[in-house]
Image (tube, helix red, strand yellow):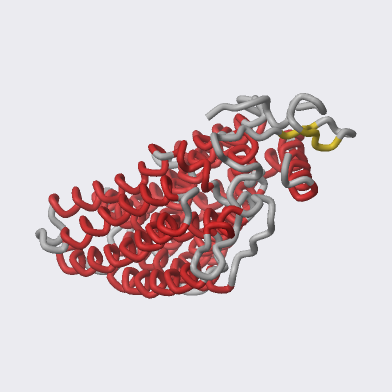
Amino acid sequence: MRGGPPLSDRRPGAGTSGLDPSVGDTVDLERGAGQPPGGPGHGVAGELEAAAARTDAAEEQKVSWLELFFDLVFVVAFDQLAKRLGSAPTFENVAEFTLLFAAVWWAWSGNTTYAARYGNAGRLYRWGTLGELVSMGMIALTLRGDLSDIAGFFALAFGINRAIQAGLHLWVARQSPELRGFARRLGLATGLSSLVWCASALLPWGGGAQLLAWTFALLLEVLTPVLARDAGRAALPHAGHLPERVGLLQIIALGEIVTEVVGGARQQRLSVATLLPALCAIILAVALWRLYFDQARSLPLLGAHLQGRVNTMLAWLYGHFPFTLSVVMLSVGAGHSISSASAQQAATLQQFVAWPLAGALATLAFLRWTTLRLTERRADRSLWALLLGAGLAALLGPTDLDPLRLHALSAALAVGVAVVVAGDSSTRRLGQIEQRVTARLEEEPDP
């Protein structure tokens, strides 16, 4: 949603307040009807008293130890998914893998956005998160074997996870009149999704009807925040907390590359022929880490708070799904290609390096674009470098390469793009805008 001048072009007097007069950046806040300045706050104290649910958006909200514990469960979930795909790396299994990964990612997203919208300090959130943590542990246990053997168990575990999430949202709706409209919609949609997941356990396990039911349940939850985005302005995520949680998940996904590479190398005799591809794959992971964290990751959230651009914020959040998916798939290709025993298997695994790398770079380009939109710029050198890198990575797919050449070219490509992005003046400019807007909110939380 568009509202007001871009963050980078405002001058003192152009909005309701100025940012740094020496630089000339200013911020403005497009308020919805009845929405207090600064957007929603960070705290749901005790049993979520309504007054505490609407504190200042700039108030600090640190990631709690419980949230870190919750996120660490996804180390196991991602590892289980990677092993599941790696055990049968065929294109027929990609759709099944993607559906299961989407469910796992959405379970993480639901807990994360809840904490960012309503706070992570209340007893309700802590107990709910403990329940979701236990359910995620059971979900991770079921991510193995054929769907015909495990689909019912997975559906029940995931249904319980969604039921807990639905209860949290409905409790918010009950306690806070200001948040009721948005929280009730999310609670009802998540509750219906939970019923669908649990009922799907009665369908033939791994059959088409069950998979369609899962897809419907996921789409129901994913689309609800989009359709309720106007009501969602009353409960915008914390501009510092959400990017931090999202970044932590990307570190977990990137760490999976190292895990799979080390596991793949253990299947071969330790030699230069094994160490060099592994080294290149680890360098590739480091380059992707640098590319991701070179983004001005808080700007889309600040744009939602200050300009009402909820669509841009949701695009930024949902854009992390294909990035995380690509990184985990890349870990499978990178690790198993090192341990591949046949030329045919190596050729298949090569596709699981080339195309996921292309997907990761293309997604980073999309995330870059969502940030540039806030400054009314459509493209910069980094965006074009990421798109070119994605195209070159895709060309690695049909090329006949051994593991060493494949990993060396992939690492060189990612490092080259990372160097361009790091040296781009636009990258520094976006980071400066992010810092100034954040500092201004901290100094004057009521613009």
Q: Can you tell which quarter of the image residue 84 is in?
A: bottom left
Vertical placement of residue 384 versus 80, above or below: above
User: What residue is at 50 percent from the left and 38 percent from the top?
Assistant: 362
Position of 92 with respect to 287 (left or right) is: left
Q: Position of residue 240 (x, y in %)?
A: 64, 53
Q: Is residue 280 visible?
A: no
Q: Can you tell which quarter of the image residue 278 is in?
A: bottom right
User: What residue is at 50 percent from the left and 35 percent from the top?
Assistant: 311
Q: Can you tell which quarter of the image residue 172 is in?
A: bottom left
User: What residue is at 58 percent from the left and 39 percent from the top?
Assistant: 304
User: What residue is at 51 percent from the left and 50 percent from the top?
Assistant: 405
Q: Quick one: 379 or 107, which is closer to the camera?
A: 107
What quarter of the picture does the C terminus occupy?
Answer: top right
Q: Position of residue 386 (x, y in %)?
A: 58, 36
Q: Quick one: 426 or 396, which is closer to the camera?
A: 426
Vertical placement of residue 320 versus 116, above or below: above
Q: Position of residue 337 (x, y in %)?
A: 42, 58
Badge count: 0
Q: Is residue 321 visible?
A: yes
Q: Position of residue 418 (x, y in %)?
A: 65, 44
